[in-house]
Amino acid sequence: PSIDLPLSADYCDSKPDSYVTCADCGTLYCSSECQRMAGERYHRGVCVGRMSPQRKELFSEMNETWRNMHFPPETTSIEVLARCFSVPPDSPYGQLLFQQLELLVHSTVSEDESLQHKLLQPQYAPQIDRIHQCLQLLYGEGERNCKWLTSDNFRSLLALLGRNQQGIGSSAFSRYVHNVEKAGLQEAAKADVDAVIDAVYEVMQEVSGPFLDVEGVGIYQYQSRLNHSCVANLEVAFAAGTHVLSIVATQ
């Protein structure tokens, strides 16, 4: 459902007139160019509207098993791997993608075993095994995918996904809030707008918990190589309101 936000004509960056959807599955894209890029790269392999009933059931089971192990927004992030396996192996993008995955996975498995991600702990073994089976049945054809869907490589990919996935804070509502904060509204007008913003965030929190502005997850090549710190001097920003991530110094 749509929301009538106060002063949206001035402060909302959304351009719904440019939105397009996949005719087969209803996936929403911000533009026809975004849809074209997804179609060339991976969408054919994850489009449930094009799947046979058997593949659709496997895809749904994969997501449901993962969802029961995760809190939003990570409930469908297993599809990051599904998209990777859907990229044509001979395409320039596919070759580059798996070259980068090779480097990132090598870094992950080379670290201290005590840092092994909690996803690989014994209590999750049955779910992980079933997700692995679903991915093998869905995407286990071809030399590249067969290599990456061996038990060891799959667990390495899963550890990479669990430890390095980044919530993408690009929601249109977060951009609206950001623009309102910068606008310098009069106190009374700002109080009215803030009341609406607070009400919307309360509803969103019931669904997504603290991940209020996150629209999805991704793995970022350079960000993944930064060392973790509990007292960080950098922060992640999505200043353009897109999936493009910036690392900003805080001091």
Image (cartoon, rainbow, N blue to C red):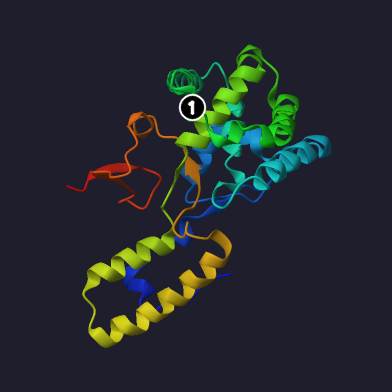
Against 192, is 223 above or below?
above
Describe residue 230's horizontal placement relative to residue 64 as left or right: left
Describe residue 241's horizontal placement relative to residue 54 as left or right: left
- For residue 14, say whether it is visible: no
- The quarter of the picture where residue 206 lies is bottom right
Mark 1 crowdedness (10 Å alpha carbons): few <14, some 14-19, many ≥20: few
Q: Residue at x 74, y 27 (%)?
A: 133
Against 7, is 59 above or below?
above
* Residue position marked by numbered label 1 in the rendering: 114
The residue at the far front in this view is 114
Q: In the image, what residue type sits under mark 1? A: Ser
The residue at the far bottom in this view is 188
Against 89, is 75 above or below?
below
- Give residue 248's position: percent from left, percent from top: 24, 45
Describe residue 251's horizontal placement relative to residue 110 as left or right: left
Q: Residue at x 32, y 72 (%)?
A: 10
- The quarter of the picture where residue 61 lies is top right
- Give residue 96's position: percent from left, percent from top: 44, 20
